[in-house]
Image (tube, rainbow, N blue to C red):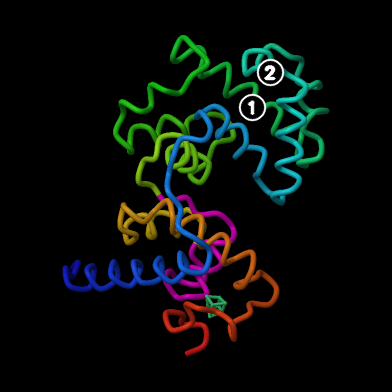
Amino acid sequence: MSCISCAKDIAKQMREIDKLLAKRYGKRVWRRRSNAIEVLMRTILSQQTNDEACLAAYSNLIGRFKCADEIMRAPVEEIESAIKVAGLSKQKARYIRSCLERILSDFGALSLDGLAKMDIQRAMSYLTSLPGVGFKTAACVLLFAFGMPVFPVDTHIHRIARRMGLVKHNASAVETQVHLDSIVPNEIKYQLHLNLIEHGRRVCKSQKPLCDSCIITRYCQRNL
Ligand code: SF4
């Protein structure tokens, strides 16, 4: 049975965590910085690699090809060689090209703007039907390109949520995303997503979390 006052408490707690992190890492205001196809390609490139490699691969890709249409029509080996630095380049090149082909066939243009008219559930289910697009990638497209209130869970957020006891220690990334999406108030999803990632990079590191200098330690079960 769900408990309304528990839900209010957890939402309050998430707002407090958000405030503390925003004080440390800065306020984040959503604006459209990239179109959905760009976010999609970048997020596919980011799978199982670090930020620097992803950025380098994306710069190579847009440096080599003028537009998404050129990428779609290029031999897959050429895409692969442009994005090599990201790792898993064979697979990612195929995913990117197949996604572009599907989008063109489904929308009649290389644009995902049609998603803006869909509700979140429908848009998520369309995106996750694309090759190589999982829950996190789909949520990134909706959050970053359209400002929809979804909460993508990357490796940093997954780790922090488990350490803090927001989800069970053995929760999968998808389970964590579903849960956090339900407890994080919509209006803070964008900012909290970005600042938790920053917190994961700087403080709640994978190998050795710096709990002594953590500003959200009072909300964390790791040190109880
Ligand atoms: S107290 Fe430690 S484990 Fe918990 S969020 Fe902070 S750094 Fe991570």
Give residue 203's quadrant in the image.
bottom right
**Which residue appears at 35% of the width and 67% of the height?**
14
Q: Looking at the picture, does residue 80 appear above or below residue 208?
A: above
Crowding around mark 2 (Cα neighbors within 10 Å: few <14, some 14 to 19, many 20+) is many
Percent x, y for residue 196?
A: 51, 62
**Which residue appears at 41% of the width and 35% of the height?**
146
Crowding around mark 1 (Cα neighbors within 10 Å: few <14, some 14 to 19, many 20+) is many
Q: Is mark 2 on a helix, strand or loop?
A: helix
Q: Looking at the picture, does residue 136 appear above or below residue 218?
A: above
Query: 116 or 19, which is in the foreground?
Result: 19
Q: Does the magenta stretch include residue 153?
A: yes
Percent x, y for residue 198?
A: 58, 61
**Which residue appears at 60% of the width and 72% of the height?**
204
Query: 208 or 212, which is in the foreground?
Result: 212
Give me the C-alpha separation between circle 2 and circle 1.
8 Å
Percent x, y for residue 56?
A: 76, 39
Point out the frontmost of discs 2 and 1: 2
Q: Mark 2 points at which residue?
A: 71
Q: Hey, what amino acid is under mark 1?
A: Ile
For disc 2, does the CB lie below 8 Å from ligand 1?
Answer: no
Percent x, y for residue 200?
A: 59, 66
Q: Looking at the picture, does residue 134 appear above or below residue 104?
A: below
Q: Does the magenta stretch include residue 222?
A: no
Q: Looking at the picture, does residue 146 appear above or below residue 206?
A: above
Query: 14 or 104, which is in the foreground?
Result: 14
Q: Give the range drawn in magenta.
A: 151-171
Report how many numbered discs are placed on residues in the image. Answer: 2
Tag 2–tag 1 contact (CB < 8 Å): yes
Q: Mark 1 points at which residue?
A: 96
Q: Hey, what amino acid is under mark 2?
A: Ile
